[in-house]
Amino acid sequence: MNGAESLVKTMLQNGVDTVFANPGTSEMHFVAALDSHPEMNCILCLFEGGTSGGADCYYRMKRDVAGTLLHLAPGFGNAYANLHNARKANSGIVNVVGDHATHHLAYESPLKGDIQGISQSVSHWTRSSLDAPSVASDGADAIRAARARNGQIATLVLPANTAWSPADGPAHAAPPPALHRPSPAEIEAAAQALTQPGAALLIGGDALFGNLRQIAGKIAAKTRARLMADTLIPRISKGAGEPVITQLPYPVPPKIETLATTTSITLVGTDRPVAFFAYPETPSLPEQPGTQITQLCRPEMDIAWTLSALADATGANKASVQTYTLDLPALPTGPVTLEKVGAALAHLLPENAIVCNEAVTSGFKVAPPLSTARPHDMLGGTGGAIGWSLPGAAGAAIACPDRKVVVLTGDGSAMYTSQSLWTMAREGLDVTVVVFANKGYQILRDELLNVGVQSYGQNAQAMFDVEKPALDWVALAKGHGVPGSRADDLESFVKALDEGLSTDGPSLIELVCP
């Protein structure tokens, strides 16, 4: 057994059975080890940002870690943006990064780079194996680190000679350390604060879906506090039966307005809200001056225990929760508007679907009708780096093969990781992609106005549009093995969406937007 084989066996023995891979020469012994273990689910991604985006959303849905296989420092660099998003999402990922053999590092070979340096800027845990016998225990430690604190980025650097040299058997990953909990005094103080006029309970992480969302709803109902969520969140349950929640909008003025009457904010599983960017003469913090901010439970703490203790302290366990009722809009017709697109999606979206929403500007108008659609999960951008939704949808579909996945993305965002369409086709993933073809980075046009630029000329316009030549998403989809269609009115969009949701496998709709 060599070091690479000991690592694969360690991963499988400890429940890590999925790897999103983009290997190179230094990882060939790891590839060979994967080949000898067909029980390991190996997903080839044609760009490293696909590996990290896939592993991120795999964790968001599976609630357990996957691996990535990356090639030296440049490969890790290509994965960086979606690792940044994964870190902001508190997703657990084990990165295995091949490196040159230790004796080869004495020379300035073309692919030599500072893997440790680039890794440590985004990973919570980084280690380079010193020899082959250490690889299995290092891998076990990486798995433990990735599962700690509700999910972390762990990176194991594997020099080529530690992969090919003889090693011992697999290692056992110890359970992660116990999560930190608030003190009884902090729970009691938060319970009292929530009963005061103008109080808000702002939740994140695991509190945004499943049973914990219901507990949070009961606490809000009992205390009469407003249940809220931040703008960019990893995962939230939506649709009929879910407790009513107010999600902070992206633009700063409406975000400030949403919190205008709030006198206290208790944070559970999330950090303090902040404006996405700084703008001239605009505050960074959206709440009113003097608002009491209580960080009861940070994202890396024990969210489930905190909500349970808070429910006990407020007497909320038997409270009646205000929930969304099923209210499907009629299928729209006529010219395309984003509001009508949202109505069509809400009408057709099947129960238990997963929606990956990276329609950065369009999504704000499309999403509202989904609150009263059939129950589903929505995944959102977390770190602000675009290009996560296509690989994220692949990861979510692999984590939950029995659920429909829908992607809402802009044409600019989708171009970052369009290679993920090929992965969807190769794996036969049940993903329906909707590309909002507004022929540009609309968010940048809006941001130029936000910083005070009221008009702009040809050079600025050229930075915002993706025309001349126009992108052909139907051709791009078919070139990656995914059936594609173009819709320029509501009738053709509804037909294409219904077909995509009614059949298995991937499909893409290019929706021509005004």
Image: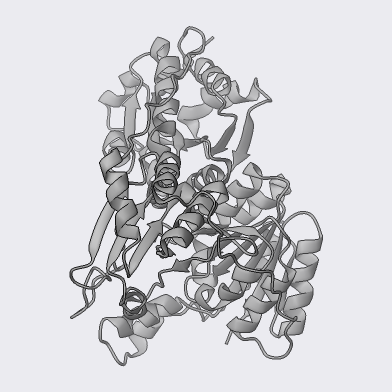
Please give left or right for residue 475 compared with residue 202 in the image: right
Q: Position of residue 22 (x, y in %)?
A: 52, 40
Q: On the image, which quarter does residue 267 sit in?
A: bottom left
Q: On the image, which quarter does residue 507 sit in?
A: bottom right
Can residue 195 be seen at all in this image of the molecule? yes
Q: Where is residue 473 in the image (x, y as percent from the top left)?
A: 64, 70
Q: How many labels does the image show?
A: 0
404 or 165, nearer to the observer: 404
Image point 45% across, 38% down: which residue? 92
Q: Position of residue 105 (x, y in %)?
A: 30, 25
Q: On the image, which quarter does residue 255 sit in?
A: bottom left
- Figure check: 335 above or below 471: below
- Figure check: 71 above or below 419: above
Image point 78% across, 69% down: which residue? 498
Can residue 234 be seen at all in this image of the molecule? no
Q: Where is residue 280 in the image (x, y as percent from the top left)?
A: 19, 79
- Figure check: 401 above or below 195: above
Quarter of the image containing the N terminus?
Answer: top right
Please give left or right for residue 259 compared with residue 343 in the image: left
- Figure check: 25 above or below 370: above
Image point 59% across, 82% down: which residue? 338
Quarter of the image containing the C terminus?
Answer: bottom right
